[in-house]
Image (cartoon, rainbow, N blue to C red):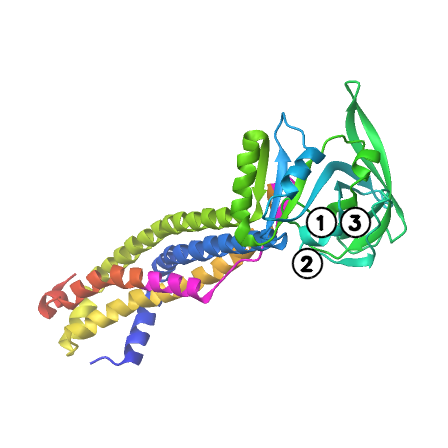
Amino acid sequence: MLNLLDVIRLAFNALRERRLRSALTILGIAIGPAAMVAIIGTTEGYMDTIVNQLQALGQNTVVIFPSKDYRLSDYDVDRLKVLPAVESITPFFQSRGQLRKPDGSTVIVTIYALDLNLLNKIIVGGKIAEGSIPPPTLYTSSVVGNDIVTTKSGVRHYNVGDSLTVYIAEMKNSKLTLKTVSVRISGILSPYGTVFPVNPDASIFLPLQAGKSLLGLKDYSGIFIIAKGAELVDSLVSNIKDMYGDNVEIISLKEIAKTVTNIINILNNLLFTVSSISFAVAFTGIMSTMFTSVVERTREIGIFKALGYSSNDILILFLFESILMTIVGVVVGVVSGVLGSYFIAYRPLRLVGSWTVISEPKITLWLILRALSLSLLVGIAGGILPAWKASKMVPVEALRYE
Protein backbone atom coordinates (compact mmCIF):
# COMPACT_ATOMS: atom_id res chain seq x y z
CA MET A 1 0.00 0.00 0.00
CA LEU A 2 1.24 3.49 -0.88
CA ASN A 3 1.99 5.80 2.00
CA LEU A 4 1.36 9.52 1.88
CA LEU A 5 4.97 10.45 1.10
CA ASP A 6 5.02 8.01 -1.84
CA VAL A 7 1.77 9.48 -3.18
CA ILE A 8 3.15 13.04 -2.96
CA ARG A 9 6.47 12.08 -4.57
CA LEU A 10 4.87 10.15 -7.44
CA ALA A 11 2.31 12.91 -8.05
CA PHE A 12 5.03 15.58 -8.20
CA ASN A 13 7.10 13.47 -10.56
CA ALA A 14 4.10 12.92 -12.85
CA LEU A 15 3.35 16.64 -13.03
CA ARG A 16 7.01 17.54 -13.55
CA GLU A 17 7.30 15.11 -16.48
CA ARG A 18 4.39 16.88 -18.20
CA ARG A 19 5.30 20.46 -17.28
CA LEU A 20 3.56 22.37 -20.08
CA ARG A 21 0.28 20.47 -19.84
CA SER A 22 0.27 20.71 -16.04
CA ALA A 23 1.08 24.45 -16.16
CA LEU A 24 -1.76 25.14 -18.60
CA THR A 25 -4.18 23.14 -16.47
CA ILE A 26 -3.07 24.98 -13.33
CA LEU A 27 -3.56 28.29 -15.16
CA GLY A 28 -7.09 27.25 -16.10
CA ILE A 29 -7.80 26.35 -12.48
CA ALA A 30 -6.36 29.67 -11.23
CA ILE A 31 -8.77 31.79 -13.31
CA GLY A 32 -11.79 30.81 -11.18
CA PRO A 33 -10.51 31.77 -7.70
CA ALA A 34 -8.67 34.80 -9.15
CA ALA A 35 -11.89 36.15 -10.67
CA MET A 36 -13.91 35.38 -7.55
CA VAL A 37 -11.48 37.02 -5.12
CA ALA A 38 -10.81 40.05 -7.34
CA ILE A 39 -14.43 40.77 -8.28
CA ILE A 40 -16.17 40.03 -4.99
CA GLY A 41 -13.38 41.54 -2.88
CA THR A 42 -13.49 44.75 -4.92
CA THR A 43 -17.29 45.13 -4.99
CA GLU A 44 -17.63 44.46 -1.26
CA GLY A 45 -14.86 46.97 -0.60
CA TYR A 46 -16.73 49.58 -2.65
CA MET A 47 -19.95 48.73 -0.84
CA ASP A 48 -18.40 49.25 2.59
CA THR A 49 -16.79 52.52 1.51
CA ILE A 50 -19.97 53.91 -0.08
CA VAL A 51 -22.18 52.93 2.86
CA ASN A 52 -19.67 54.37 5.36
CA GLN A 53 -19.50 57.62 3.41
CA LEU A 54 -23.28 57.89 3.32
CA GLN A 55 -23.51 57.13 7.02
CA ALA A 56 -20.89 59.80 7.65
CA LEU A 57 -23.47 62.39 6.62
CA GLY A 58 -25.92 60.85 9.06
CA GLN A 59 -28.61 58.20 8.62
CA ASN A 60 -31.14 60.78 9.77
CA THR A 61 -30.27 63.34 7.06
CA VAL A 62 -32.76 64.13 4.30
CA VAL A 63 -31.99 66.53 1.45
CA ILE A 64 -34.65 68.18 -0.71
CA PHE A 65 -34.00 69.60 -4.17
CA PRO A 66 -36.63 71.48 -6.20
CA SER A 67 -37.92 70.09 -9.49
CA LYS A 68 -37.36 72.03 -12.70
CA ASP A 69 -40.51 74.16 -12.37
CA TYR A 70 -40.61 74.61 -8.61
CA ARG A 71 -38.87 77.21 -6.44
CA LEU A 72 -37.98 76.68 -2.79
CA SER A 73 -38.46 79.64 -0.44
CA ASP A 74 -38.86 80.51 3.24
CA TYR A 75 -42.48 79.43 2.92
CA ASP A 76 -41.32 75.84 2.33
CA VAL A 77 -38.89 76.01 5.26
CA ASP A 78 -41.76 77.13 7.55
CA ARG A 79 -43.96 74.28 6.29
CA LEU A 80 -41.32 71.64 6.80
CA LYS A 81 -39.91 72.66 10.17
CA VAL A 82 -43.24 71.98 11.94
CA LEU A 83 -43.29 68.33 10.90
CA PRO A 84 -43.08 66.15 14.04
CA ALA A 85 -40.03 64.18 12.87
CA VAL A 86 -37.91 67.27 12.15
CA GLU A 87 -35.17 68.16 14.64
CA SER A 88 -33.28 70.79 12.61
CA ILE A 89 -33.63 72.36 9.20
CA THR A 90 -31.64 74.75 7.04
CA PRO A 91 -32.14 75.88 3.47
CA PHE A 92 -29.01 76.35 1.40
CA PHE A 93 -27.74 78.10 -1.68
CA GLN A 94 -25.29 76.22 -3.85
CA SER A 95 -22.93 77.35 -6.60
CA ARG A 96 -19.85 75.97 -8.30
CA GLY A 97 -16.78 77.89 -9.35
CA GLN A 98 -13.08 77.76 -10.03
CA LEU A 99 -10.38 78.68 -7.54
CA ARG A 100 -6.95 79.59 -8.82
CA LYS A 101 -4.23 78.90 -6.25
CA PRO A 102 -0.98 80.85 -5.83
CA ASP A 103 1.03 78.14 -7.61
CA GLY A 104 -1.14 78.56 -10.73
CA SER A 105 -3.14 75.35 -10.25
CA THR A 106 -6.93 75.47 -10.36
CA VAL A 107 -9.53 73.49 -8.47
CA ILE A 108 -13.29 73.23 -8.93
CA VAL A 109 -15.03 74.15 -5.67
CA THR A 110 -18.62 74.07 -4.47
CA ILE A 111 -19.91 77.00 -2.45
CA TYR A 112 -22.69 76.44 0.09
CA ALA A 113 -24.49 79.18 1.96
CA LEU A 114 -26.40 77.74 4.92
CA ASP A 115 -26.83 77.88 8.68
CA LEU A 116 -23.24 77.15 9.73
CA ASN A 117 -24.36 76.24 13.25
CA LEU A 118 -25.80 73.03 11.75
CA LEU A 119 -22.62 72.15 9.84
CA ASN A 120 -21.60 69.54 12.42
CA LYS A 121 -24.98 67.81 12.01
CA ILE A 122 -24.90 67.86 8.23
CA ILE A 123 -21.29 66.65 8.10
CA VAL A 124 -21.24 64.21 10.98
CA GLY A 125 -17.75 63.95 12.46
CA GLY A 126 -16.49 67.04 10.66
CA LYS A 127 -14.20 69.17 12.82
CA ILE A 128 -12.78 72.66 12.60
CA ALA A 129 -9.02 72.09 12.57
CA GLU A 130 -8.14 75.80 12.63
CA GLY A 131 -10.08 78.99 13.26
CA SER A 132 -13.79 79.05 14.02
CA ILE A 133 -17.26 79.27 12.50
CA PRO A 134 -18.03 82.90 11.59
CA PRO A 135 -21.18 84.62 12.91
CA PRO A 136 -24.18 84.80 10.51
CA THR A 137 -23.70 88.52 9.93
CA LEU A 138 -20.20 88.14 8.45
CA TYR A 139 -21.41 86.73 5.16
CA THR A 140 -18.01 87.14 3.44
CA SER A 141 -16.32 84.90 6.03
CA SER A 142 -16.17 81.19 5.37
CA VAL A 143 -15.30 77.72 6.57
CA VAL A 144 -13.32 75.88 3.89
CA GLY A 145 -12.36 72.27 3.21
CA ASN A 146 -8.84 70.94 3.47
CA ASP A 147 -8.36 70.60 -0.31
CA ILE A 148 -8.98 74.34 -0.68
CA VAL A 149 -5.98 75.35 1.42
CA THR A 150 -3.52 72.56 0.57
CA THR A 151 -2.43 70.52 -2.44
CA LYS A 152 -2.55 66.73 -2.65
CA SER A 153 1.14 66.68 -1.76
CA GLY A 154 0.40 68.65 1.43
CA VAL A 155 1.76 72.05 0.35
CA ARG A 156 -0.11 74.80 2.23
CA HIS A 157 -1.38 77.78 0.21
CA TYR A 158 -3.81 79.51 2.56
CA ASN A 159 -4.23 80.11 6.29
CA VAL A 160 -6.95 81.46 8.54
CA GLY A 161 -7.46 85.15 7.72
CA ASP A 162 -6.41 84.86 4.08
CA SER A 163 -8.76 85.78 1.23
CA LEU A 164 -9.92 83.50 -1.58
CA THR A 165 -11.17 84.55 -5.00
CA VAL A 166 -13.56 82.19 -6.79
CA TYR A 167 -14.69 82.66 -10.38
CA ILE A 168 -18.28 81.62 -11.03
CA ALA A 169 -19.71 81.32 -14.55
CA GLU A 170 -23.17 82.86 -14.96
CA MET A 171 -25.49 83.91 -17.76
CA LYS A 172 -26.19 87.62 -18.00
CA ASN A 173 -28.15 89.08 -20.93
CA SER A 174 -27.76 85.80 -22.81
CA LYS A 175 -23.99 86.03 -22.43
CA LEU A 176 -21.69 83.85 -20.36
CA THR A 177 -19.74 85.97 -17.90
CA LEU A 178 -17.44 85.32 -14.95
CA LYS A 179 -18.58 86.53 -11.54
CA THR A 180 -15.82 87.14 -9.00
CA VAL A 181 -16.53 86.17 -5.39
CA SER A 182 -14.00 87.00 -2.67
CA VAL A 183 -14.28 85.47 0.80
CA ARG A 184 -12.13 85.43 3.92
CA ILE A 185 -11.11 82.17 5.59
CA SER A 186 -12.50 82.05 9.12
CA GLY A 187 -12.16 78.30 9.71
CA ILE A 188 -10.53 75.27 8.09
CA LEU A 189 -12.05 71.79 8.25
CA SER A 190 -10.01 68.68 9.00
CA PRO A 191 -9.55 66.31 6.02
CA TYR A 192 -12.83 64.42 5.66
CA GLY A 193 -13.14 62.60 2.35
CA THR A 194 -15.70 62.70 -0.42
CA VAL A 195 -19.31 61.97 0.52
CA PHE A 196 -22.64 62.39 -1.21
CA PRO A 197 -24.24 64.85 -1.81
CA VAL A 198 -21.60 67.08 -0.14
CA ASN A 199 -17.83 67.01 -0.67
CA PRO A 200 -16.55 68.87 2.41
CA ASP A 201 -12.88 68.80 1.37
CA ALA A 202 -13.53 70.76 -1.83
CA SER A 203 -16.27 73.07 -0.51
CA ILE A 204 -16.56 76.59 0.83
CA PHE A 205 -19.26 77.10 3.48
CA LEU A 206 -20.71 80.58 3.97
CA PRO A 207 -23.43 81.98 6.25
CA LEU A 208 -26.93 81.66 4.78
CA GLN A 209 -27.25 85.39 4.04
CA ALA A 210 -24.29 85.18 1.64
CA GLY A 211 -26.44 83.24 -0.82
CA LYS A 212 -28.34 86.36 -1.75
CA SER A 213 -25.90 89.14 -0.88
CA LEU A 214 -22.70 87.54 -2.21
CA LEU A 215 -23.72 84.85 -4.69
CA GLY A 216 -26.69 86.80 -6.03
CA LEU A 217 -29.08 83.82 -5.88
CA LYS A 218 -32.80 84.34 -5.30
CA ASP A 219 -34.19 80.85 -4.70
CA TYR A 220 -32.87 78.16 -2.41
CA SER A 221 -30.94 75.35 -4.10
CA GLY A 222 -32.24 72.86 -1.55
CA ILE A 223 -33.06 72.18 2.07
CA PHE A 224 -31.18 70.02 4.58
CA ILE A 225 -33.44 68.34 7.13
CA ILE A 226 -32.16 66.50 10.20
CA ALA A 227 -34.67 63.99 11.58
CA LYS A 228 -34.96 63.32 15.31
CA GLY A 229 -33.87 59.73 14.70
CA ALA A 230 -33.00 57.36 11.86
CA GLU A 231 -36.17 55.38 12.61
CA LEU A 232 -38.26 58.47 11.74
CA VAL A 233 -36.69 59.07 8.31
CA ASP A 234 -39.16 56.88 6.42
CA SER A 235 -42.20 58.63 7.90
CA LEU A 236 -40.58 62.04 7.28
CA VAL A 237 -39.94 61.21 3.61
CA SER A 238 -43.52 59.97 3.29
CA ASN A 239 -44.88 63.22 4.75
CA ILE A 240 -42.77 65.33 2.38
CA LYS A 241 -43.96 63.29 -0.61
CA ASP A 242 -47.57 63.83 0.45
CA MET A 243 -46.96 67.59 0.75
CA TYR A 244 -45.00 68.15 -2.47
CA GLY A 245 -45.59 65.24 -4.81
CA ASP A 246 -43.32 65.59 -7.84
CA ASN A 247 -42.40 69.20 -7.07
CA VAL A 248 -39.29 68.15 -5.16
CA GLU A 249 -36.67 65.44 -5.31
CA ILE A 250 -36.02 63.80 -1.95
CA ILE A 251 -32.68 62.21 -1.12
CA SER A 252 -32.70 60.04 1.97
CA LEU A 253 -29.18 58.91 2.83
CA LYS A 254 -30.59 55.96 4.76
CA GLU A 255 -32.49 54.79 1.68
CA ILE A 256 -29.49 55.34 -0.59
CA ALA A 257 -27.30 53.25 1.74
CA LYS A 258 -29.92 50.49 1.73
CA THR A 259 -30.30 50.64 -2.06
CA VAL A 260 -26.53 50.60 -2.64
CA THR A 261 -26.21 47.55 -0.38
CA ASN A 262 -28.98 45.71 -2.25
CA ILE A 263 -27.55 46.58 -5.67
CA ILE A 264 -24.04 45.44 -4.77
CA ASN A 265 -25.38 42.23 -3.22
CA ILE A 266 -27.24 41.50 -6.47
CA LEU A 267 -24.11 42.42 -8.43
CA ASN A 268 -22.02 40.12 -6.23
CA ASN A 269 -24.37 37.21 -6.88
CA LEU A 270 -24.32 37.93 -10.61
CA LEU A 271 -20.52 38.17 -10.72
CA PHE A 272 -20.22 35.01 -8.63
CA THR A 273 -22.35 33.21 -11.22
CA VAL A 274 -20.20 34.58 -14.04
CA SER A 275 -16.97 33.60 -12.29
CA SER A 276 -18.42 30.12 -11.71
CA ILE A 277 -18.25 29.58 -15.48
CA SER A 278 -14.47 29.58 -15.17
CA PHE A 279 -14.79 26.75 -12.63
CA ALA A 280 -16.71 24.75 -15.23
CA VAL A 281 -13.86 25.38 -17.68
CA ALA A 282 -11.36 24.27 -15.03
CA PHE A 283 -13.41 21.09 -14.44
CA THR A 284 -13.22 20.26 -18.16
CA GLY A 285 -9.49 21.01 -18.24
CA ILE A 286 -8.71 18.80 -15.25
CA MET A 287 -10.75 15.91 -16.59
CA SER A 288 -9.15 16.19 -20.03
CA THR A 289 -5.63 16.36 -18.58
CA MET A 290 -6.18 13.42 -16.25
CA PHE A 291 -7.79 11.22 -18.93
CA THR A 292 -4.81 11.94 -21.21
CA SER A 293 -2.45 11.11 -18.34
CA VAL A 294 -4.23 7.81 -17.70
CA VAL A 295 -3.93 6.80 -21.37
CA GLU A 296 -0.26 7.77 -21.58
CA ARG A 297 0.59 5.91 -18.34
CA THR A 298 -1.35 2.72 -19.05
CA ARG A 299 1.81 0.54 -18.95
CA GLU A 300 2.94 2.30 -15.77
CA ILE A 301 -0.42 1.47 -14.17
CA GLY A 302 0.02 -2.16 -15.24
CA ILE A 303 3.48 -2.25 -13.62
CA PHE A 304 2.11 -0.77 -10.38
CA LYS A 305 -0.59 -3.42 -10.24
CA ALA A 306 1.86 -6.21 -11.12
CA LEU A 307 3.98 -5.05 -8.16
CA GLY A 308 1.04 -5.52 -5.83
CA TYR A 309 -0.49 -2.03 -5.63
CA SER A 310 -4.25 -2.18 -5.15
CA SER A 311 -6.95 -0.44 -7.16
CA ASN A 312 -7.42 1.96 -4.24
CA ASP A 313 -3.72 2.87 -4.39
CA ILE A 314 -4.04 3.74 -8.09
CA LEU A 315 -7.26 5.67 -7.44
CA ILE A 316 -5.64 7.71 -4.67
CA LEU A 317 -2.51 8.36 -6.74
CA PHE A 318 -4.34 9.80 -9.75
CA LEU A 319 -6.89 11.66 -7.62
CA PHE A 320 -4.08 13.27 -5.63
CA GLU A 321 -2.51 14.51 -8.88
CA SER A 322 -5.69 16.43 -9.73
CA ILE A 323 -5.95 17.73 -6.14
CA LEU A 324 -2.29 18.82 -6.23
CA MET A 325 -2.84 20.78 -9.45
CA THR A 326 -5.94 22.32 -7.90
CA ILE A 327 -4.11 23.42 -4.75
CA VAL A 328 -1.33 25.06 -6.79
CA GLY A 329 -3.96 26.68 -9.02
CA VAL A 330 -5.90 28.02 -6.01
CA VAL A 331 -2.75 29.54 -4.47
CA VAL A 332 -1.85 31.21 -7.77
CA GLY A 333 -5.46 32.30 -8.28
CA VAL A 334 -5.98 33.76 -4.80
CA VAL A 335 -2.69 35.69 -4.91
CA SER A 336 -3.54 36.99 -8.40
CA GLY A 337 -7.07 37.87 -7.24
CA VAL A 338 -5.80 39.84 -4.23
CA LEU A 339 -3.28 41.76 -6.37
CA GLY A 340 -5.94 42.33 -9.04
CA SER A 341 -8.48 43.64 -6.53
CA TYR A 342 -5.99 46.20 -5.21
CA PHE A 343 -5.16 47.24 -8.79
CA ILE A 344 -8.85 47.74 -9.60
CA ALA A 345 -9.66 49.52 -6.33
CA TYR A 346 -6.64 51.81 -6.71
CA ARG A 347 -8.45 53.65 -9.50
CA PRO A 348 -11.03 56.18 -8.22
CA LEU A 349 -14.66 55.36 -9.02
CA ARG A 350 -16.62 58.48 -9.99
CA LEU A 351 -20.31 58.11 -9.19
CA VAL A 352 -22.27 61.37 -9.16
CA GLY A 353 -20.83 64.83 -9.77
CA SER A 354 -17.77 65.21 -7.54
CA TRP A 355 -18.59 62.07 -5.54
CA THR A 356 -15.54 59.90 -6.09
CA VAL A 357 -14.94 56.66 -4.22
CA ILE A 358 -11.52 55.22 -3.48
CA SER A 359 -11.86 51.98 -1.57
CA GLU A 360 -9.79 49.15 -0.24
CA PRO A 361 -10.72 45.60 -1.28
CA LYS A 362 -12.47 43.53 1.34
CA ILE A 363 -10.55 40.24 1.28
CA THR A 364 -12.04 38.09 4.01
CA LEU A 365 -11.08 34.63 5.22
CA TRP A 366 -14.57 33.48 4.25
CA LEU A 367 -14.01 34.64 0.65
CA ILE A 368 -10.69 32.77 0.42
CA LEU A 369 -12.18 29.63 1.97
CA ARG A 370 -15.10 29.79 -0.46
CA ALA A 371 -12.72 30.02 -3.43
CA LEU A 372 -10.60 27.18 -1.98
CA SER A 373 -13.51 24.86 -1.25
CA LEU A 374 -15.15 25.41 -4.64
CA SER A 375 -11.84 24.83 -6.43
CA LEU A 376 -11.13 21.65 -4.47
CA LEU A 377 -14.62 20.40 -5.25
CA VAL A 378 -13.97 21.04 -8.94
CA GLY A 379 -10.55 19.36 -8.71
CA ILE A 380 -11.93 16.23 -7.04
CA ALA A 381 -14.94 16.08 -9.38
CA GLY A 382 -12.72 16.49 -12.45
CA GLY A 383 -10.19 13.87 -11.30
CA ILE A 384 -12.44 11.18 -9.83
CA LEU A 385 -13.60 9.61 -13.11
CA PRO A 386 -10.12 9.36 -14.71
CA ALA A 387 -8.74 8.02 -11.40
CA TRP A 388 -11.54 5.43 -11.22
CA LYS A 389 -10.84 4.38 -14.82
CA ALA A 390 -7.14 3.97 -14.00
CA SER A 391 -7.91 1.91 -10.91
CA LYS A 392 -10.09 -0.52 -12.88
CA MET A 393 -7.45 -1.40 -15.47
CA VAL A 394 -6.56 -5.07 -15.75
CA PRO A 395 -2.79 -5.53 -15.19
CA VAL A 396 -2.24 -7.95 -18.09
CA GLU A 397 -4.05 -5.73 -20.60
CA ALA A 398 -2.30 -2.62 -19.28
CA LEU A 399 1.15 -4.22 -19.67
CA ARG A 400 0.37 -5.13 -23.31
CA TYR A 401 -0.64 -1.53 -24.15
CA GLU A 402 1.61 0.12 -26.74
Q: Is residue 126 above or below residue 111?
A: below
Question: What percent of the width, then of the height, locates residue 380?
Answer: 27, 64
Type of amino acid under label 1: Pro
Name the residue beneath numbered marker 1. 200
Q: Residues within 10 Å of mark 1 (few under 14, many from 20)?
A: many
Residue at image coords 30%, 62%: 377
Question: What percent of the width, then of the height, locates residue 392?
Answer: 13, 66
Give the label on residue 125, or none.
2
Residue furthest to the top in view is 174
Residue at image coords 39%, 47%: 270
The magenta stretch is 352-376
Question: What percent of the width, then of the height, locates residue 367?
Answer: 43, 62
Instruction: Describe the element under mark 3 as helix, strand or loop.
Output: strand
> Is residue 287 shown left or right of residue 128?
left
Q: Is residue 161 visible to the viewer in this orientation of the structure?
A: yes
Q: Of the residues under marks 1 and 3, which one precedes in the sequence?
A: 3
The quadrant in which residue 312 appears is bottom left
